[in-house]
Image (cartoon, rainbow, N blue to C red):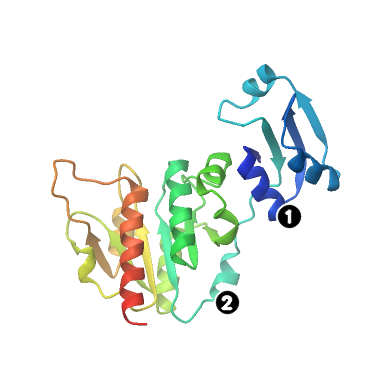
Amino acid sequence: MIVYGRNVAKEVLSNNLKINKVLLQEGYSDQELIDELNKRNVNIKYLNKNMMNKLEEGNHQGIILDIEDYEYYDEAEMFNNMPKNPFIVILDHLEDPHNFGAIIRTCEAAGVDYIIIPKDRSVRVNKTVMKVSAGALNNVKIVMTTNLNRFINKIKENGVWVVGTALSDSVYYDKVDYNMPVALIIGNEGKGISQLVKKNCDFVVKIPMIGKINSLNASVAAGIMIYEVVRQRGTNE
């Protein structure tokens, strides 16, 4: 996986991720970072600014890294190590890596136990997600499942209540008691949650929309929902 940026590089080093190769812009000035890479015998290649910009259009800050692919948490291990009162966030075919990265940051800050994504037709951990998540990626457990509805049914069999988000046939999000094992489902940016997923939910909730726009950015909606769970659980601790 190709990632870039000074903060991402420091995150990679602090989490001891395997680095295959590093490209540095000629004249790169962060000697401390260079020394750390040399300590680990990382293969470093220097390129001029034009070459670096051709390889990566994003704000690479003079450093591009080729690292091992992200390792998703094992689904079977998740079920074997489920906490007593789990807090799970399920992303129903989310597509935007910026939304994914922002949701990862929120989940890490809120103490979410697991993030679930489907294997097909869904955003995965990539360089954008890693940069937007800003250090949170390696502190959360992300599970990739081959069949989202099968997964939902399985967590329900394990005593987890499933809460989906949709504007129709729903109640306001703060009317549900989240002091229970819970999984929140955040839908696709354009289509929301699928009808089959919606049918499998124990509760369907919505966030009040007062203005003319009838939907929120997925990461914003996720933040509101996640912190309602945190608020309710914190109130009763």
The percent position of residue 165, horizontal first and vertical second, equals: 28, 58
Q: Tally the marks.
A: 2
In depth, the one of 78 and 105 nearer the eye is 105
Which residue is at a point 52% across and 51% down the rendered structure image? 119
Residue type (three-letter) at the residue carrying disc 2? Asn
Q: Is residue 115 left or right of residue 24?
A: left
Where 13 sits versus 1, above or below? below
User: Which of disc 1 and disc 2 is earlier in sequence?
Assistant: 1
Residue drawn at x 46%, y 61% as measured from the top left: 109
Name which residue lies at 71% across and 43% down: 67
Amino acid type, mark 1: Asn
Please state which of residues 148 and 125 is positioned toward the viewer in this rendering.
125
Please identify the quadrant where the N terminus is shown. Answer: top right
Say which mark, if any, is on residue 16.
Answer: 1
Packing grade of label 1 (10 A; few <14, some 14-19, many >=20) is: few
Q: Position of residue 206 (x, y in %)?
A: 22, 58
Crowdedness near tag 2: few (<14), some (14–19) or many (≥20) residues, C-alpha within 10 Å:
few
Is residue 175 shown left or right of residue 229?
A: left
Quadrant of the rendered image containing residue 26: top right
Write the residue at 43% across / 66% down.
88
Residue bearing the label numbered 2: 80
Judge whether residue 69 can be spotted in this image. no
Position of 83 compared to 156: left or right? right
Q: Is residue 68 left or right of residue 120?
A: right
**From this viewpoint, is residue 149 visible?**
yes
Secondary structure at numbered mark 2: helix
Residue 213 x/y as whole percent: 18, 41
Quarter of the image with the C terminus in it: bottom left
As drawn, the residue found furthest toward the top would be: 50
